[in-house]
Each structure stands twice: as C-alpha cells, then as structure tokens.
Image (tube, rainbow, N blue to C red):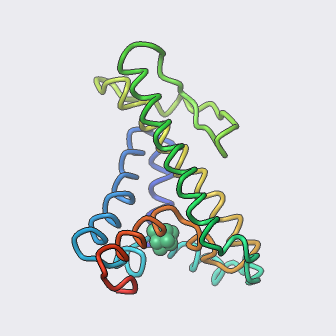
C-alpha cells in the first residue's frame, strides 16, 4: 500500500477533485475501529505508514533516532488531534462559505496551515459545485501538510514517528478503548 500516498498526491496535481479520495483514509480506520473495535487499518492497510517504513529501507533517509519524549507523549498526541480536528472543521467552514456564495474558491494549497501555494491548474472540475472544489483544496492541503510533517519526523527520528501523534491513530485508539476491543488487531 505504500504507493497509495504517492498516487494520491500525483492525482491531485492534475485534478484537485481526486483529493476527495483522501476521505477513504479518514473513513476506513474509523469503520474498523467503530464496527470491529480494532486498528486493522493501521496495522495492515495504511499506505502512509507503509511509505514511511519503506523509504528509509530504500533510501537510507532516516536517522533512526528515538523521538523526544514530548513527541511521543499522550498530551501531545491528543493536543495535535484537537488541533487537526479544528483545521478540518475550518476546511468544512470554508467550503460552507463557498456554498453560500460568501467567497469564491481559493485555488491554492495551504502548506503547514500558513503558506498558500498557487494550484489553479488543477481546478478542472467542470460541472462540480464550487463548494466541492473548495473542500478538495482544503483536504489536499491537510493531507499534504501532514505528509510533509510525517516525512520530516521520519527523516529526523524513527521511520514511523508520525504514528505517535497521527490524528487517525489517536482517534481510533480512543474508539477501540471505549469499545474494549483489541487495539493491536
Ligand atoms: S497511526 Fe496514522 S499513519 Fe500510522 S498507521 Fe495509523 S492511520 Fe496510518
């Protein structure tokens, strides 16, 4: 599955609507956690973590050091989850504003929540409503930003350091605990 994130980001360079495929990475882990009480997605299907494990083996691009304690701590994990959810809520809000005609589509990808990168060439939506295009830009921004952070911590520390504070990993862990399931399945 390691090739999936590469395909995803490549598709989003040609047509931003492919960013909607990122919802699969949101919904699948939740479904396994809610209905199965397990983290099957994390352990077997997550392309992102498989890419982080694969790249250092091929390119020797990870220092392999243990991440600092704060980065592996519960408080950071859940604080980052709250922050990430707030950013996702903002994506939905911006899409709502476009839906209501309060603002036009922003044809940019926002990196690290700050830097706007022009991405207008990928807006080839045709008859798709503007709010759906705006959501695609927002989701792609979130996915790309989190991937870049994951790559950075992969290089600086151990390959799968991102998993220590990945929002989907955190939320599915909470769900599994509530359900009393086996988090390791
Ligand atoms: S914690 Fe996140 S990145 Fe890691 S395997 Fe789970 S969903 Fe994938």
> Which of the pair 11/44 is nearer the observer?
44
Image point 50% across, 51% down: which residue? 10
Could you tell whether 14 is left or right of 108 in the image? left
Seen in the image, is 126 located left or right of residue 52?
left
Horizontal and vertical percent for residue 137?
Answer: 48, 36
Q: Nearer the viewer, residue 168 or 178?
A: 178
Is any atom of residue 2 visible in this view?
Answer: no
Quarter occupied by the N terminus = bottom left
Percent of width and height locating residue 90: 50, 36
The answer to whether residue 170 is left or right of residue 112 is left
> 14 or 117, which is in the foreground?
117
Q: Is residue 92 above or below residue 40?
A: above
Question: Where residue 39 sits: x, y (%)?
Answer: 37, 77
List the single residue furthest toward the left: 35
Q: In this view of the protein, can residue 70 be seen by the observer?
A: yes
Residue drawn 50% across the image and 52% down it: 9
| Quadrant in the rendering for residue 36 | bottom left
Q: How many marks?
A: 0
Residue in the picture at 38% in, 80% down:
44
Q: Residue at x 36, y 51 (%)?
A: 21
Asked if residue 22 is positioned above or below residue 92 in the image, the reply reads: below
Residue 96 position in % (x across, y down)? 39, 26
- Above or below residue 168? Residue 54 is below
* Quadrant (top left/top right/bottom left/bottom right) for the C terminus: bottom left
């Amino acid at each position: 599955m390691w090739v999936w994130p590469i395909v995803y980001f490549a598709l989003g360079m040609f047509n931003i609507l492919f960013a909607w495929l990122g919802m699969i990475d949101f919904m699948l882990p939740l479904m396994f956690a809610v209905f199965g009480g397990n983290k099957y997605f994390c352990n077997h299907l997550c392309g992102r973590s498989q890419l982080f494990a694969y790249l250092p083996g091929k390119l020797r691009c990870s220092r392999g050091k243990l991440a600092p304690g704060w980065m592996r701590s519960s408080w950071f994990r859940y604080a980052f989850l709250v922050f990430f959810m707030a950013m996702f809520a903002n994506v939905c809000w911006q899409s709502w504003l476009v839906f209501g005609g309060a603002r036009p589509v922003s044809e940019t990808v926002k990196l690290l929540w700050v830097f706007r990168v022009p991405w207008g060439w990928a807006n080839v939506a045709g008859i798709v409503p503007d709010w759906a295009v705006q959501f695609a830009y927002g989701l792609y921004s979130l996915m790309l930003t989190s991937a870049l952070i994951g790559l950075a911590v992969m290089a600086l520390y151990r390959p799968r350091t991102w998993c220590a504070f990945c929002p989907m990993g955190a939320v599915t862990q909470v769900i599994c605990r509530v359900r009393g399931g086996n988090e390791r399945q």
